[in-house]
Amino acid sequence: MIRPIAASPPGAITLEIAGTAVGTEAEGPHRRFAVWVQGCTLACPGCCNPEMFVRGRGRTIEVPALNRAISEAAQTAGVEGITVLGGEPLQQLGAVAALCEAAAAAGLGVIVFTGHTLAEARGQVGFERLWACIDTLVDGRFDARQPDAARRFVGSRNQTLVHRTPRYADPSLWQGEPTVELVLTPGEPLRLVGAPALARRVVRSLRGGS
Ligand code: SF4
C-alpha cells in the first residue's frame, strides 16, 4: 500500500534537477515519477542527456516539495514508484538519499540509474544510506558501442541491474519493446524520454533524417 509521504521540517535539503515526469512508463516498470538530476561529470560518449552535464543549469527544488509532488502523484496518478536518473544521482548523494528515503518509507518503489558501478558507489561516503532504500540500481557507464536491445529501460549491455529487493527482480518486467514518450511537465521544456537508441532515431526522423 502506498502511504502519503510524511511532512518534513522547514529548512530542507535541496536538489538541483533537470526535470520530472509524472506517470511515465518509459523509465522503469509500472507507472513512475521520474526525476532527472542536473549535473554529471562522467561524460559518457553518446550520452543522450548532455544538457544535464553542467551544474547550475537546472532548477533547485527543496526535497520535501518534490516529495509532496510524488505523494500526490501516487494518490492520484497511479504512480507505483520513483526513478532517479540524470545527470548523475550520486553527485547529489545526500539530497537523493533524502528523496529516496521518504519515497521508500511511503511504500513506493525506488529505482536509481547511476553511471558508477556498485563497487565504485560503495566507496562514496553516504552511499549506504541511499542503498538502504533502493529496490533496483542500474549501474555502470553508458557505452554507445553496446546498445541494449534486449532489456527495456537500459541503455547499454554492460550496465547491470542490481536488485537489492525482489520488487523489480522479475526479468519479465525489464523485457519488451523499447519505448519513448513525449513528456510535457508544467514549467519544463517538452522532453523525449525512454530508450536512448530509440529516442535518437525518433529525433533524427523528426529532423528529416532516416
Ligand atoms: S553517467 Fe549517465 S548522465 Fe552521466 S554521462 Fe553517462 S549516461 Fe550521461
Image: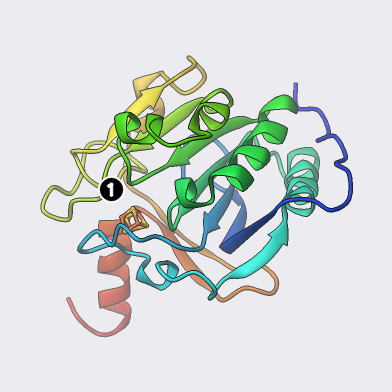
Q: How is the image coloured?
A: rainbow
Q: Is residue 26 visible?
A: no
Screen quadrant of the C terminus: bottom left
Residue at horizontal 53 percent and vertical 76 percent from the top = 57
Q: Is residue 169 visible?
A: yes
Asked if 208 appears above or below 47 in the picture, the reply is below
Q: Quadrant of ligand 1?
A: bottom left
Is residue 12 left or right of 7 when viewed as pictured? Answer: left
For label 1, the residue is: 155
Q: Residues within 10 Å of mark 1 (few under 14, many from 20)?
A: many
What is the quadrant of residue 117 in the picture? top left
Q: Position of residue 79 (x, y in %)?
A: 67, 39
Residue at horizontal 70 percent and vertical 39 percent from the top = 78
Is residue 200 left or right of 3 when viewed as pictured? Answer: left
Circle 1 SS class? loop
Asked if 73 appears above or below 39 in the picture, the reply is above
Camera-nearest residue between 69 and 152: 69
Q: Position of residue 54 (x, y in %)?
A: 43, 71
Is residue 163 left or right of 6 when viewed as pictured? Answer: left
Q: Ligand 1 near label 1 (Cβ, under 8 Å)?
A: yes
Q: Amino acid at mark 1?
A: Gly
Residue at horizontal 29 percent and vertical 84 percent from the top = 207
- The outermost residue toward the left is 145
Screen quadrant of the N terminus: top right
What is the quadrant of residue 96 in the picture? top right
Q: Position of residue 187 (x, y in %)?
A: 69, 74
Q: Position of residue 146 (x, y in %)?
A: 13, 47
Residue at horizontal 46 percent and vertical 45 percent from the top = 90
